[in-house]
């Protein structure tokens, strides 16, 4: 039987095994396309709207094909869903035996060697970071590690402090490797890698996949198929993993590591002073793209490199045969020094194909370097190596060329099983002033007040800036009778939980909440968007890409990103077959900008549209009655 038919038959069996399950035409269309891509070894871009069930649509044909598969996700929530729900269910009901594993970056696992090093009071004094952490918290982490099967930070009942976790974990840059570590045979991270190497399905995050691509396949086990979920984020994440950053924190971390092995206060002071010096010279350039390296920054980088040469010499003078943890500590410090020296040299001579800029708050600036174009990297590190399936609820136009995908691929859009025509409404407030006019904010506050009142709360209000969010929170809280939660009130998980549990609440949030928020049911009946989410004109990486695109910059760079973000925001509304509600956009350009309005509207779910607020209010009152 052809693999496409086998896959659909397997999906039907899975649906029958699911309480209340029903067949979904978009899911079956997608799974047939994925099976065909695997058989033909052609890459596939699959846009699959909310409710498609795309996880099963790619997992089932991948597993049945017998090919080792890497599934890369953009969010921890999706990673947890795959590992905690979808894959266990398929293990039980698919009728095809397979193994799966979750693999994370090394710093996500507790390091047994670090625990051994800090277990004695005398050793605490040797490690500045461990010395600053709470002894009680370190003891709790040590007890947990003694009983944990995985050492994965995600298993902890409470989130550890940054200082404590940094004291008991290591990054990939500083780990000496299993063969050179006394605890290599029982290392949690190495155990996770071994499990992944033996698994048929390996679940990772996009950042880890990006590192594997950037390092010519040095991070992940050999595999035959890659599935990229939330693929609209792939370009930015690969650009990030192919670049690097220099910050005071890297020097501070190095100073702590060196202090644990080298008894040379002058050398330690040099490293710590480098951290202070780098922050000082970068703070004047925060938010700026550096087309040429400023002389002051260039001098600071050169001085830092010279100081690292002295650190390397001091580390070489440390004997390896003391019979304790000296060799491992020395190896970690040496690797940190080498990695930092390599990036300092690279920052001093950035090619035209990369962008150099400074970001972060003034007190903690970071010098960033990233490639403008990742098409070549992806072509060599992904497309030419294995078959890939890229999927998302929203895939921006022009994604394939920007990712270096040539004609050897297929593209499909399977839509969504949800009844957008009957259950939703798109309202554009065309009477509101242009966002660049002074009357825009007060008009938005009036709109929010009226719509939230009609919905009885139940609102996710999305903003393109903290300034706009803060103004709206202050204005609307005083004018409605239902609770207003602000993104500033509590951490994201707690905030989403509080919003989900209170139907009368409204949540006001910025760009971090436009994606990955899943609140089905009456709790979320209204999504509002203050203005069209155009990228910032001064964002350095996009600025460089615009320069390369020249006259086509708006069409190639800005418009696809805006359409994708707008669709992601609007996609928060309908999350189940029974959901009903309104998406309200307060930016009149969605209806009036002849040049691009249909490019944006056509990317949104196919809601009926209105410019009449009274119609939107009536729809909301009916939806929540």
Image (cartoon, rainbow, N blue to C red):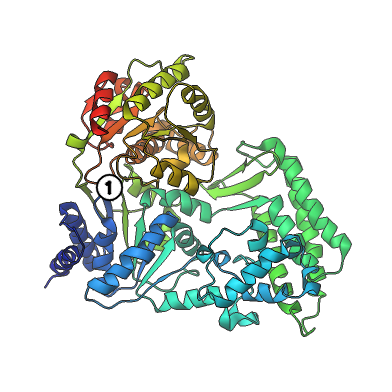
Location of the N terminus by quadrant is bottom left
Disc 1: CA contacts within 10 A as few (<14), some (14-19) or many (>=20): many
Residue 617 drawn above or below residue 83: above
Residue 65, position in %: x, y? 24, 72
**Residue at (76%, 77%) from the top-left corner?**
326
Q: How many marks?
A: 1
**Residue at (34%, 53%) from the top-left corner?**
405
Residue 511, position in %: x, y? 46, 38
Asked whether residue 367 appears in the rendered view, the answer is yes
Tag 1's secondary structure? Answer: loop
Instruction: Tell whether 332 sits left or right of 67.
Output: right
Q: Residue furthest left?
A: 1
Residue 93, position in %: x, y? 23, 72
Asked whether residue 596 appears in the rendered view, the answer is no
Residue 621, position in %: x, y? 26, 28
**Residue at (52%, 52%) from the top-left corner?**
240
Instruction: Tell whether 464 sits left or right of 25.
Output: right
Q: Which residue is mark 1?
A: 50
**Residue at (36%, 47%) from the top-left corner?**
518
Location of the C terminus by quadrant is top left
């Amino acid at each position: 039987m052809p693999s496409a038919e086998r896959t659909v038959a397997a999906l039907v069996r899975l649906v029958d095994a699911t309480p209340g399950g029903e067949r979904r035409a978009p899911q079956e269309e997608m799974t047939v396309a994925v099976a065909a891509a695997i058989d033909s070894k052609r890459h596939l871009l699959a846009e699959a709207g909310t409710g498609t069930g795309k996880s099963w649509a790619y997992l089932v044909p991948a597993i049945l094909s017998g090919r080792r598969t890497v599934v890369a996700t953009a969010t921890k929530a999706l990673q947890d869903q795959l590992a905690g729900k979808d894959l266990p269910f398929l293990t039980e009901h698919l009728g095809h035996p397979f193994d799966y594993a979750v693999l994370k970056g090394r710093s996500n696992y507790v390091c047994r060697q670090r625990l051994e090093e800090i277990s004695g009071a005398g050793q605490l004094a040797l490690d500045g970071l461990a010395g600053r952490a709470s002894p009680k918290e370190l003891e709790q982490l040590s007890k947990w590690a003694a009983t944990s099967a995985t050492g994965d930070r995600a298993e902890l009942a409470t989130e550890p402090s940054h200082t404590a976790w940094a004291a008991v974990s290591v990054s990939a840059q500083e780990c000496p490797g299993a063969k050179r570590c006394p605890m290599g045979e029982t290392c949690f991270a190495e155990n996770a890698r071994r499990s992944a190497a033996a698994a048929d399905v390996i679940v990772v995050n996009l950042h880890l996949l990006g590192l594997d691509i950037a390092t010519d396949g040095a991070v992940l086990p050999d595999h035959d198929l890659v599935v990229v979920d939330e693929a609209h984020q792939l370009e930015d994440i690969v650009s990030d993993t192919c670049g690097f950053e220099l910050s005071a924190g890297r020097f501070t971390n190095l100073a702590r590591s060196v202090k644990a092995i080298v008894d040379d206060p002058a050398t330690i002071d040099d490293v710590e002073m480098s951290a202070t010096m780098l922050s000082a010279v970068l703070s004047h350039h925060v938010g700026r793209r550096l087309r040429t390296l400023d002389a002051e920054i260039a001098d600071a980088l050169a001085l830092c490199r010279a100081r690292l040469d002295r650190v390397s010499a001091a580390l070489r003078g440390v004997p390896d045969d003391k019979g304790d943890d000296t060799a491992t500590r020395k190896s970690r410090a040496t690797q940190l020094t080498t990695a930092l020296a390599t990036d300092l040299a690279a920052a001093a001579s950035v090619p035209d194909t990369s962008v150099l800029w400074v970001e972060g708050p003034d007190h903690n600036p970071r010098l960033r370097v990233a490639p403008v174009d990742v098409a070549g990297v992806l072509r060599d590190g992904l497309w030419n190596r294995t078959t890939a399936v890229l999927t998302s609820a929203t895939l921006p136009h022009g994604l394939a060329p920007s990712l270096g995908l040539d004609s050897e691929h297929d593209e499909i859009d399977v839509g969504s099983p949800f009844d957008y025509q009957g259950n939703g409404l798109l309202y554009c407030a065309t009477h509101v002033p242009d966002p660049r006019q002074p009357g825009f904010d007060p008009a938005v506050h009036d709109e929010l007040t009226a719509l939230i009142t009609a919905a009885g709360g139940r609102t996710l209000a999305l903003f393109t800036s903290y300034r706009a969010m803060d103004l709206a929170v202050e204005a609307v809280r005083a004018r409605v009778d239902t609770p207003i939660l602000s993104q500033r009130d509590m951490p994201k998980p707690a905030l989403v939980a509080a919003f989900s549990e209170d139907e009368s609440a409204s949540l006001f949030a910025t760009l971090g909440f436009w994606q990955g928020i899943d609140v089905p049911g009456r709790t979320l009946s209204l999504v509002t968007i203050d203005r069209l989410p155009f990228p910032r004109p001064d964002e350095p990486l996009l600025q460089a890409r615009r320069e390369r695109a020249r006259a086509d910059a708006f069409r190639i760079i800005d418009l696809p990103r805006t359409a994708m973000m707008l669709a992601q925001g609007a996609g928060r509304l309908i999350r189940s077959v029974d959901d009903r509600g309104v998406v309200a956009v307060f930016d009149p350009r969605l209806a009036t900008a002849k040049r691009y309005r249909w490019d944006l509207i056509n990317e949104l779910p196919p809601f009926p549209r209105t410019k009449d607020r009274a119609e939107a209010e009536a729809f909301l009152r009916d939806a929540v009655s």
